[in-house]
Image (cartoon, rainbow, N blue to C red):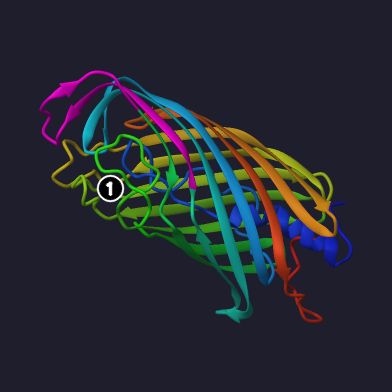
């Protein structure tokens, strides 16, 4: 039976699902979507109780764009692209104590930073082609754009549902003309809806998230990525209040073409991935901590890099507002 007793264990269970509520965005140009695929998963629609939480994802990715496919990046067209990244995604989430529309409201802020390396066999300068250059490599360690988010979640027994919005604020360290960037240099928004069936009696978690990303134009490259659809899912079994494991996956499809003076084609992208996850809850002193690993292998890519991604996540509550007597704020995560 997947049961816990007492506030400390309940808090530990909440931090175990917290990371699934925190999401970040990443580069729109460069053959990758604006939304960080795989960032949601188990317990995607479960809202933590009122309080302040901290979570940090270490996102590790390695992939390539096969064949002679052209990749628009940094105002250039790149061919024969290989890329790798290690990015930290620290996030603070505040869940308000007051009910909003019968649910719980959470507000988040993220400032990503890290390392990215992009190599290309050939680059062609300018939106209409022009001078071709040989192989190029661009490695950076820098700060990305801040991301602000809001989410509203509800619960009825084992069923949870949630809506959310994320806004990318283009004030990060963007380097014009470089083929590696963590910042995006344009405004963007992602809207999503999530559902979770989390049965506390048997510990089964079935979650799904659908969303759409909308991108503004990058003024440095006159490039605007089209609207992007994403779907993520998770099927996880909790063996006890500490350990869980299961399967995860995602699908991405660009539904409208790229545009702007810097676009030479609609460049609609697509990719799918499947993988596995394991989570473990523990204490450091008297403070509960949650750790999770998620691994994804990508396939069926088109106009987009295809590779492997790993998320290593640590989550911890900074403060918890104890629910009033008779409150159902802890239901579904016992």
In the image, residue 10 lies at what x, y percent? 80, 62
Residue 299 appears in the picture as rendered: no
- Pointer 1 local density, CA inside 10 Å: few below 14, some 14–19, many at least 20: many
**Foreground of the two, 193 or 241:** 241
At horizontal 48% and vertical 47% (from top left) the residue drawn is: 113
Residue 304 appears in the picture as rendered: yes
Secondary structure found at label 1? loop
**Foreground of the two, 10 or 155:** 10
Location of residue 66 (image quadrant): top left
Residue 115 painted magenta:
yes
Please tell me whether residue 253 is drawn above or below residue 7 in the rendered image: above
In the image, residue 223 lies at what x, y percent? 21, 46
**Foreground of the two, 72 or 135:** 135
At horizontal 37% and vertical 36% (from top left) the residue drawn is: 270
Which portion, as a residue range, is magenta?
113-137
Residue 310 painted magenta:
no
Please tell me whether residue 60 is drawn above or below residue 172 in the rendered image: above
Left-right relation of 118 to 12: left
Q: Is the magenta stretch mostly helix, strand or loop?
A: strand
In the image, residue 260 lies at what x, y percent? 16, 47
The C terminus lies in quadrant: bottom right
**Foreground of the two, 90 or 261:** 90
Q: Name the residue under label 1.
A: 226
Left-right relation of 308 to 118: right
Left-right relation of 163 to 130: right
């Amino acid at each position: 039976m997947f049961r816990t007793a007492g506030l400390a264990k309940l808090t530990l269970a909440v931090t175990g699902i917290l990371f699934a509520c925190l999401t970040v965005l990443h580069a729109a140009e460069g053959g990758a979507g604006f939304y960080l695929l795989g960032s949601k998963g188990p317990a995607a629609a479960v809202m933590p109780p009122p309080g302040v939480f901290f979570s940090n994802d270490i996102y590790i990715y390695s992939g390539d764009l096969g064949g002679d496919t052209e990749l628009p990046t940094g105002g250039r067209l790149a061919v024969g692209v290989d890329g790798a990244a290690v990015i930290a995604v620290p996030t603070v989430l505040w869940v308000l104590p007051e009910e909003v529309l019968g649910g719980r409201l959470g507000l988040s802020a993220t400032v990503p930073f890290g390392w990215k390396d992009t190599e290309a066999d050939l680059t062609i300068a300018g939106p209409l082609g022009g001078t071709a250059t040989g192989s190029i490599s661009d490695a950076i360690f820098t700060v990305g754009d801040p991301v602000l988010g809001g989410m509203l979640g509800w619960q009825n027994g084992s069923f949870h549902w949630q809506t959310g919005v994320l806004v990318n604020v283009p004030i990060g360290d963007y380097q014009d003309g470089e083929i590696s960037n963590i910042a995006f240099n344009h405004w963007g928004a992602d809207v999503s809806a999530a559902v979770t069936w989390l049965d506390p009696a048997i510990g089964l978690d079935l979650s799904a998230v659908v969303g759409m990303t909308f991108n503004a134009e990058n003024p440095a490259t006159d490039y605007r990525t089209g609207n992007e659809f994403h779907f993520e899912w998770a099927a996880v079994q909790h063996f006890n209040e500490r350990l869980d494991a299961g399967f995860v996956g995602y699908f991405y499809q660009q539904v409208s073409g790229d545009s702007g003076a810097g676009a030479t084609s609609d460049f609609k992208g697509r990719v799918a991935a499947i993988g596995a996850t394991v989570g473990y809850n523990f204490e450091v002193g008297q403070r509960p901590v949650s750790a999770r690993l998620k691994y994804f292998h990508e396939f069926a890519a088109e106009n987009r890099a295809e590779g492997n991604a790993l998320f290593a996540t640590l989550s911890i509550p900074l403060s918890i507002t104890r629910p009033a007597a008779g409150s159902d704020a802890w239901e579904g995560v016992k």
